[in-house]
Image (cartoon, helix red, strand yellow):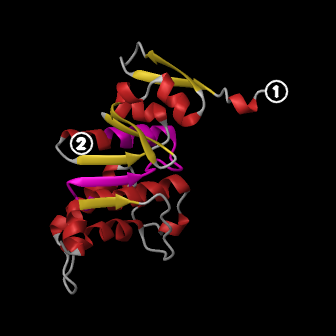
Amino acid sequence: MNRKDIARCVGYLAQNNSTPFPFKVDETVMMGRYPYLSRFTSETSDDWRAVNQALKAVDVESIRDRHINELSGGEHQRVLLARTLSGETPVLLLDEPFTNMDIQHCLKISEILKEHAYAGHSVVISIHDLNLAFQYCDRIVLLLQGRVLANGGTEDVLTPTLIKQAFQVEAIIHENQGSGKHVLMSSIKNEAAKPR
């Protein structure tokens, strides 16, 4: 596969995404459509449809004419996620997609990604928020020092024993009566930090 073919299959959001040039928000999101454009062709109505859907999905439609270097950290992250979504790829690889986002947008975007997965797409997320992982992920690969510690269904992997092994914290897992979802509550009890 050439680079354009790969870009039509896999949308990627890196953890550290700097944008050195002051592009407008909608121009930035349109960059996700470049794999579909030829060198000297203009954007089509289909390209703008994808861009507009992505802008609306992540709640940045109202700032589409602002320059990306004028945005807050959370707005900036949502624009970059919109750029990734505008590519309409069957696979999404997202490295810490919720960086700098407030809880409202974290939850909203988690729902969008869940819908994306339920529509038959693959969504792979690197995430450190175990509560979000518990609520939205169907399958977990838990890493320890770059190696797979556990791999399987969420409830099979996010256990107090494996969490302690991976993060050196005690974890309590309980059922949230309102939503029926499992929620992870953890308290830091690092053995090395105990006074002697």
Viewer-side residue, 164 vs 19: 164
Element under disc 1 = loop
Residue range in magenta is 86-111
Does residue 61 sit above or below 180 in this rendering?
Answer: below
Q: Does the segment drawn in magenta span residue 37?
A: no
Disc with the residue nearer the chain's start (2 vs 1) = 2
> Is disc 2 surrounded by few (<14), some (14 to 19) or many (20+) residues within 10 Å?
some
Residue, disc 1: 195
Q: Residue at x 38, y 49 (%)?
A: 59
> Is disc 1 surrounded by few (<14), some (14 to 19) or many (20+) residues within 10 Å?
few
* Quarter the C terminus occupies: top right
How far separated are the C-alphas under marks 2 and 1? 46 Å
Q: Position of residue 55 (x, y in %)?
A: 33, 56
Q: Nearer the viewer, mark 2 or mark 1?
A: 1
The amino acid type found where label 1 is placed reads Pro
* Quarter the N terminus occupies: bottom left
Does residue 66 sit above or below 145 in this rendering?
Answer: below
The amino acid type found where label 2 is placed reads Ala
Q: Residue at x 22, y 85 (%)?
A: 39
Q: Position of residue 154 (x, y in %)?
A: 35, 30
Element under disc 2 = helix
Viewer-side residue, 63 vs 142: 142
Viewer-side residue, 46 vs 191: 191
Does residue 91 sit above or below 160 in this rendering?
Answer: below
> Horizontally, is 163 left or right of 125 in the view?
right
Does residue 162 sit above or below 55 in this rendering?
Answer: above
Q: Position of residue 33 (x, y in %)?
A: 25, 68
> Horizontally, is 68 left or right of 81 in the view?
right
Question: Which mark is drawn over residue 145?
Answer: none
Residue, disc 2: 117
Q: Residue at x 46, y 66 (%)?
A: 66
Q: Where is residue 65, by image quadrant?
A: bottom left
